[in-house]
Image: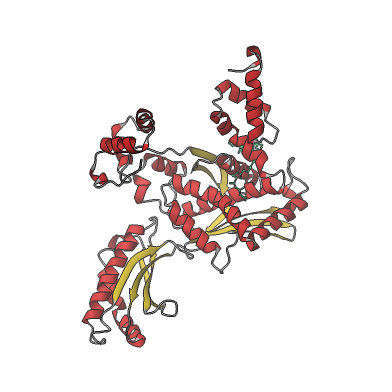
Amino acid sequence: MATSVNGFSKLTKQEKIAWLASHHFKNKETGIEILKQYWNSDIKLQRLHDEFIENTISNFYLPLGIAPNFLINGKYRTIPMAIEESSVVAAAGNAAKFWQKRGGFKAEVLGTEKVGQVHFIYAGDVDKLREFFSQVQPKLFDATFELTENMRKRNGGITAITLRDKTEDLQHYYQLHCTFETRDAMGANFINSCLETIAKAFEFELKSSDLFTPREKDIQIVMSILSNYVPNCKVRASVSCKIEELRTDKNMDPLDFAHKFVRAVEIANIEPHRAVTHNKGIMNGIDAVVLATGNDFRAIEAGAHAYAAKDGRYRSLSQASIVDDVFTFSLEIPLALGTVGGLTSLHPLVKLSLEILEHPSAEELMEIVATAGLAQNFAALRSLTTEGIQKGHMKMHLLNILNHLGATPKQKAYFTSHFKNKTISHKEVIAEFNALKEKDDAQVPK
Ligand code: HMG
């Protein structure tokens, strides 16, 4: 049973597991065995993973899949995807295969500006604060001179520091709104270090200034932190072709398909319930590549959804149109990604994923990730507006159901072939599996 524990972090891994087993596992031996099954036999590799986070007791696997055939800006990419959900990788591969014959994907980085803010409370005269800020601003850059040295050598660094008056929204609340160029790094640590230095310098200068009364000098730096909302660190991915080229043996009439597809996107644009699921489909592709390349998917998720609601209403992140017989489908999304720093040089599979992607720059990775999101969205909408999502999705999910039922490899092969061209339901698979078991031994694949 759960109970309070003091000093848990100081226990050894074995002791933590023993505590867990005695308080939470019905069957201690089995629970411990499961945890240990997922340990890596290479002790060094296991230690590396143990040290990624705190209180580590085991590893939590996600499959790493591969979606080939992505023709992006005229260059083929093979995309690694870390994800647990069936049919996502297949859908990505399917969309890639579809668009490679229709000119491929175009992707373009629209901006790479990162953001961080020093949030502070000042109860004095606003004009004095403005005047002080204009005097002190160069000193704030100077204060970070050493910190930014390497980044400046790469043509990065702090691009602007501005004072923002937020007192209309919250009494006495101001910000130092800072923007950054972090090149191939996601830059979280760099940004946060700069912000903390800027905050200290700002407070010191303000307290030393003759402009303010003692009361006005009593400012409060509430916090200094990067923002994961980066609307100017944005990428656009798109596909486009003549409507007639949308024809396949599986599709409905291409014109009907194109119109229905555009309608589906329009619905996601004005209806938040649909928009959330629509964007979830995009994030299937985005998150999987973000994870495989060791980037922070929570930051990407939070920023993407804030961007989807930028005009006060939650909308589709993608857009579709038909102009002069040309179908265009595009996605614009903020993506602050890195290909150096963080896990990128630590996690062996992340390193390998970046190798599979041929060591992209952060901007190239933005293009690849946005393309994966667009491809995913295209595949899902194509299914939704034609045969329905369940046919393809459940075909891929079949192995999960069969594993759940304890099917043998032969039984899995039998059912995969049996259900090949059918829309599968969970109930139907169970019924057919049980019926098969009742047949005489000769007919049952084992
Ligand atoms: P299909 O047409 O039956 O596939 O599609 P196919 O057998 O003709 O194969 C064509 C290509 O698809 C293959 O080419 C692969 O690229 C890929 P090939 O490798 O043969 O040269 N493919 C596979 N890749 C790996 N393993 C496989 C596999 N099968 C096909 N086993 C497919 C089947 C599932 C791809 C299609 O129906 C599809 O794209 N469905 C969409 C599935 C989807 O969107 N899944 C996401 C999860 S559902 C969700 O969460 C999002 C949603 O709610 C979002 C929204 O509402 O907008 C739907």
The picture quadrant where one finds residue 414 is top right
Is residue 57 toward the left or the right of residue 434 in the image? left
Q: Residue furthest top?
A: 442
Residue 163, percent from left and from top: 37, 77
Q: Is residue 391 visible?
A: yes
> In the rendered picture of this protein, how many numbered marks are placed on residues?
0
In this figure, which colouring scheme has been used for the structure?
Answer: secondary structure
Q: Is residue 301 left or right of residue 204?
A: right
Up-down relation of residue 8 to residue 194 (above or below): above
At a point 65% along the width and 13% down the height, the residue shown is 440
Task: Answer with the quadrant where ligand 1 appears in the image.
Answer: top right
Tell me the residue at 45%/52% (across/down).
297
Image coordinates of residue 348 in percent, x first then y, are 37, 39
- Residue 233, x across and y down, in percent: 47, 62
State the quadrant of the C terminus: top right
Please give the name of the residue rendered at 33% of the width and 38% of the height, measured from the top-left corner: 23
Check the image and name the residue furthest to the left. Answer: 208
Q: Residue at x 35, y 83 (%)?
A: 130
Depth order, front residue of 444/227: 444
Residue 215 location, quadrant: bottom left
Q: Does residue 143 appear left or right of residue 396 in this picture? A: left
Q: In which quadrant will I find the N terminus?
A: top left
In front here: 316 or 347? 316
Q: Position of residue 295 (x, y in %)?
A: 42, 50
The answer to whether one can see residue 320 in this image is no
| 416 relative to 442, above or below | below
Q: Quadrant of residue 85?
A: top right
